[in-house]
Image (tube, rainbow, N blue to C red):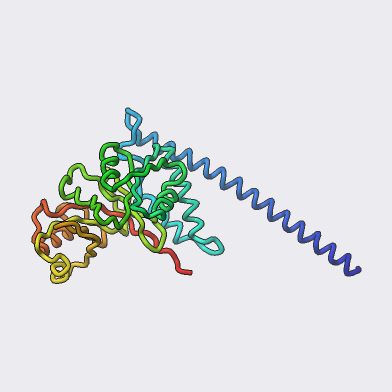
Amino acid sequence: MTDNASSSTGNTDRTADLSAVRVEIDAVDDQIHALLIRRAELVQQVAATKRQPDGTLPRGAYRPAREAHIHRRLYDQNRPPLPFGTVFRLWREMIGTFTAIQSPVTVSMHTGGDSGLARVAREHFGTAAEIEDRATCHAVSQDVTSAPGTVGVVPVDAPGDAWWTGCLDNPESAPNVIAAIPCYGRALSGYCLSLSMPEPSGDDCTLLAVRPGAKDPQAALQAAGIEADILATHGDAALLRLAGFHTAPDGTARRSLAAALGLADPDIATVGAYPVPIAQETA
């Protein structure tokens, strides 16, 4: 056999192998598509089960704790050559679409001038969500309060726009933090607000607003051996973050915090809690 004949045979074999791989890829694509349709059908069943007589869902369809379980399970079982960042973006779009199938998702957002937060919010809620910009965090809070089911997005750092003090002033009507975004990344960009109560995901952080008066909260916390981060201050109020899920008014962590800072009930309020995001791998 000549060299040209050997080369021609080798090329034919490689072409046949490539064609076989492409046929298998097409088959996998068809399976993925069929499974997505089946998942959408199951989501419809879930929505029908939860839907009230007036056609609404009692707590909306956005469930960050449930989504955190999905993210973490996928992260644990993912393997090369598929990067988890790709998996995460695919699932965020998929979850956003399936959430909208249950109930339309409206997001009220204030970016505080952070264009990155707008991108993160869109990636988080997906293309099916309707996202409306607001001029202030307080406007977002009002949207959430006046339209149950609306999700608010505010930046984690909003100097001069301390929306969280509303949890001290009007604890019965103030929205709660129920998520932090992005759920996979190296730094938080925003908090998600809702009238729904936060749910534990198994690995959470809790936000509390306090009015310690003249007492130095950082020194008092250190003296009491309480690990808490002071994220922001506004006037005589401070926003604290504690590891764990501590939203119960009579919980041990909250009682310890109140004792350390000498707080009465009106001077401490739960701002919310959120699933701890998955830390993005460094390159």
**Image quadrant occupied by the N terminus:** bottom right
Instruction: Tell me which corner region of the image, top left, top right, bottom left or bottom right, holds residue 180.
Output: bottom left
In depth, the one of 211 and 51 nearer the eye is 211
Residue 185 location in percent, x, y?
Answer: 41, 61
Determine whether, in the image, residue 38 is placed left or right of residue 154: right
At 30% across and 57% down in the image, what residue appears? 157
156 relative to 73 in the view: left or right = left
Horizontal arrangement in the rendering, residue 188 relative to residue 228 (left or right) = right
Q: Horizontal and vertical percent for residue 22?
A: 68, 53
| Residue 244 position in % (x across, y down) | 26, 60
The residue positioned farthest toward the right in the image shown = 1
Who is closer to the viewer here, 275 or 51? 275
Apparent side of residue 79 relative to residue 125 in the rendered image (left or right): right
User: Residue 236's x, y, as percent?
Assistant: 14, 58
Which residue is pictured at 27% across the width and 54% down the height?
273
Report which quarter residue 152 is drawn in. top left
In the foreground, 48 or 261: 261
Which residue is at the front of the view, 228 or 239? Answer: 239
Q: Is residue 70 above or below residue 83?
A: above
Which residue sits at x=16%, y=50%?
Answer: 168
Residue found at x 81% / y 59%? 12
